[in-house]
Image (cartoon, rainbow, N blue to C red):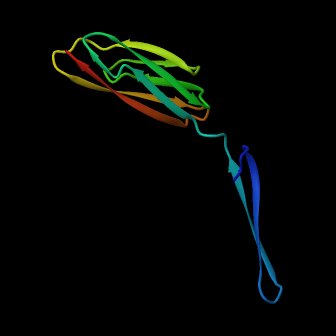
């Protein structure tokens, strides 16, 4: 495996039982590592309008977006980060899926999610 970003040439040479050889090469471009995303929430079950603390982390991040699942979101450029969000009072038990997307400088992204349950 290629551990460092760069341009490499891989060559395969075969030899038959008469000693004749043949070769072919291919150019391999290895980019930087893909980003990773890690999202944690505490607590994941709340009653009423209490805040939930989200921990945002990842690797190879140029920027990130955190979607709370209730139509609100926040974005940033540095990880790790901690964000607090209060879900609106609900009249019935409601589940929200919070999604973190971490993007690298090439706009490739990784995602993680956590479910939050809000009781009235």
Residue 16 placement, left or right of 114: right
Question: In x, y percent, where is residue 73?
Answer: 40, 19
Question: In x, y percent, where is residue 85?
Answer: 38, 13
Report which quarter residue 88 is drawn in: top left
Question: In x, y percent, where is residue 116?
Answer: 32, 24
- Number of numbered labels in the structure image: 0
Of all residues, the one furthest to the right in this rendering is: 19
Residue 114 placement, left or right of 57: left
At 59% from the left and 20% from the top, the residue drawn is: 78
Q: Camera-side residue: 43 or 85?
A: 43
At 83% from the left and 85% from the top, the residue drawn is: 19
Report which quarter residue 9 is drawn in: bottom right
Question: In x, y percent, where is residue 114?
Answer: 38, 29
At 60% from the left and 35% from the top, the residue drawn is: 106
Q: Quadrant of the C terminus?
A: top left
Q: Is residue 80 above or below residue 33?
A: above
Q: Is residue 5 above or below residue 118?
A: below
Q: Camera-side residue: 45 or 107?
A: 45
Q: Is residue 13 above or below residue 100?
A: below
Of all residues, the one furthest to the left in this rendering is: 91
At 28% from the left and 10% from the top, the residue drawn is: 49
């Amino acid at each position: 495996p290629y551990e460092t970003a760069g341009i490499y040439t891989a060559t395969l040479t075969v030899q038959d039982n008469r000693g004749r050889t043949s070769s072919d090469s291919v150019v391999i471009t290895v980019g930087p590592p893909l980003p990773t995303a890690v999202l944690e929430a505490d607590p994941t079950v709340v009653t009423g309008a209490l805040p939930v603390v989200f921990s945002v982390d990842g690797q190879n991040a140029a920027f990130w977006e955190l979607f709370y699942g209730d139509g609100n979101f926040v974005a940033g450029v540095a990880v790790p980060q901690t964000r607090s969000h209060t879900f609106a009072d609900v009249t019935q038990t409601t589940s929200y899926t919070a999604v973190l997307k971490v993007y690298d400088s090439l706009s490739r992204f990784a995602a993680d999610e956590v479910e939050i349950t809000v009781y009235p």
